[in-house]
Image (spheres, coloured by chain):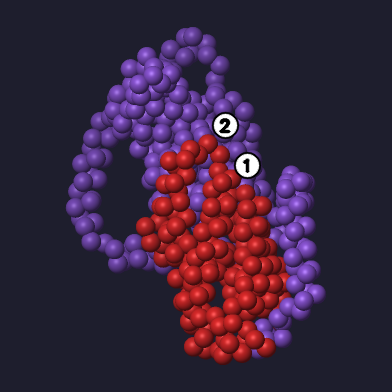
Chain colours: A red, B purple
Amino acid sequence: MKFLLYLILVLLLVPTQTTLLPYLSVWGIKPDLGLVAAACIGLFAGEMDGLLVGLAIGWALSLFSAGELWVSLLTDGGVGLLAGFLGRQVSQVTFATLGVGVLLVSLASGLLAIVNFKNVDSAQMWWIVESIVLPQACFDGLVGAGLYWLLSQRFDVTRLRTE
Amino acid sequence: MWMVNSRSSSGARLVAVACFALLLVALVLLPNQIQGLLHYLDGPVGHVVSVPLEAIASFDAGIVARWEQYVALQGVWEENQQLRKEIEWLRGQNSQLRESAAATERLTALLQFKEQALPTMVAAQVIGRDATNRYRAIILNKGESDGIMPDMGVITPAGVVGRVVKTTGSSSVVLLVTDPNNAIAGLIQRTRDEGIVEGTQQGLAKLKYIPLLSTLRDGDRVVTSGLVGGFPRGLAIGTITHIDKQEGALFLSAELLPEVDVGRVEEVLVIQSSYGQATKVAGGVDLPGKPLP
């Protein structure tokens, strides 16, 4: 059952990210739903699930991106794993803490990705950080917080995490 | 709740860390082998993931078509009048170009130039945009099973769109001409000076490495040089809007306005073979201007 849910999530994530999200982009920036999903699964289902689903999401999304495969695998898998660990250290997760957490991991993954860019000088790198990486991290944080808020309205998220 | 019982035990936690560390080491030490191994699985996984992608893309295309055909019709009359004027002007220009073409044909025959075969192309639809914000790329609904391979050029009848960088069985990713990671050999049509066209971070394009003594000016058109890459000679890339002359630099560079509005492109042609090496591929089309299916 769980495997099926994860499979559906990965299959639906790709068309949502590549076809539907461009309509919701703000100044050409769209959120990275793969990263948000990996973070949420790591938080609620633990490190192992976060890592495996993050890797699957990273791989599926990299098939439909010009980016390098290893960057997607490391960022999405790493975020799932990290979210699982951080979820244990924070006694009470709120939509605000989740939003800030997703913002920080999105920022880290964006910086990791641009370090891999070739032929980019420091001025261009700074432009990418302030025009793409930072706005996307804020967007990801908002989407993560919104998703957590929606889940908290529907489920008892505290029990979901602690049991 | 399915998630309640799935919290990891400390053993699973260690396994997760070990798996991630192993993956990290493998990607650092054996990047090509690991990615090559995963590439074998790309085909079947790509096929499976393409099914919902194409379904949602066709649903999306249906909605966009309805909107454009019935709702967004404001200003169509004015646009129609403007287009009629343009057609009149283009008819006149077409007649002059036919004369030039006939003269060129006569001269070519006179000089006994080797006749060039037209490139073979396959038409494809755009079904999505790059999954990340870091690259300017589009996703096509055709892939390896349709004969599309990495490094093939992608165009519209208006000009160059980009280059195929990744393929799965039924889809491919095209890096746009406006992406900074893309480089296409270009030629200034009037002066015949060559350079390299690269994208800019701002979503335009730039012609680099132009000889210092070039007499280029704003408004000059840049076309593909056909020397390297998947493009034949003479396809429109863009128009020069600004020339950058830096003190002490060995070359000039110029900003370009791309010929194709890559943000709105919906159908494209993938060049499967350039001039002089055309081979008929199943489902391929032979003429650059042939209408899409």
Residue kind at label 1, given as amino acid type: Pro
In the displayed structure, would residue B37 be above or below residue B11?
A: above
Q: Position of residue A111 (x, y in %)?
A: 54, 52
Which residue appears at 66% of the width and 72% of the height?
A85
Residue kind at label 2, given as amino acid type: Gly
Are circles 1 and 2 on residues that touch, CB within 8 Å? Answer: no
Dot 1 falls on which chain? Answer: B
Which residue appears at 59% of the width and 78% of the height?
A90
Q: What secondary structure is marked by label 2?
A: loop
Q: Position of residue B174 (x, y in %)?
A: 54, 46
Q: Which residue is mark 2?
A: B229
Q: Which residue is mark 1?
A: B150
Residue B164 in view: yes
Number of numbered discs overlaid on the protein picture: 2
Q: Is residue B35 left or right of residue B177?
A: right
Mark 1 nearby-residue class (10 Å; few <14, some 14–19, many ≥20): some
Q: Nearer the viewer, residue A39 or B87?
A: A39
Measure the alpha-carbon separation of dots 1 and 2.
Answer: 11 Å
- Closer to the chain start, of discs 1 and 2, is 1
In the displayed structure, would residue A4 be above or below residue B36?
A: below
| Residue B202 image-quadrant placement | top left
Q: What secondary structure is marked by label 1?
A: loop
Same chain letter for marks 1 and 2: yes
In the displayed structure, would residue B81 be above or below residue B57?
A: above
| Residue B93 image-quadrant placement | top left
Q: Position of residue B183 (x, y in %)?
A: 51, 34
Q: Is residue B19 left or right of residue B201?
A: right
Which residue appears at 66% of the width and 58% of the height?
A73
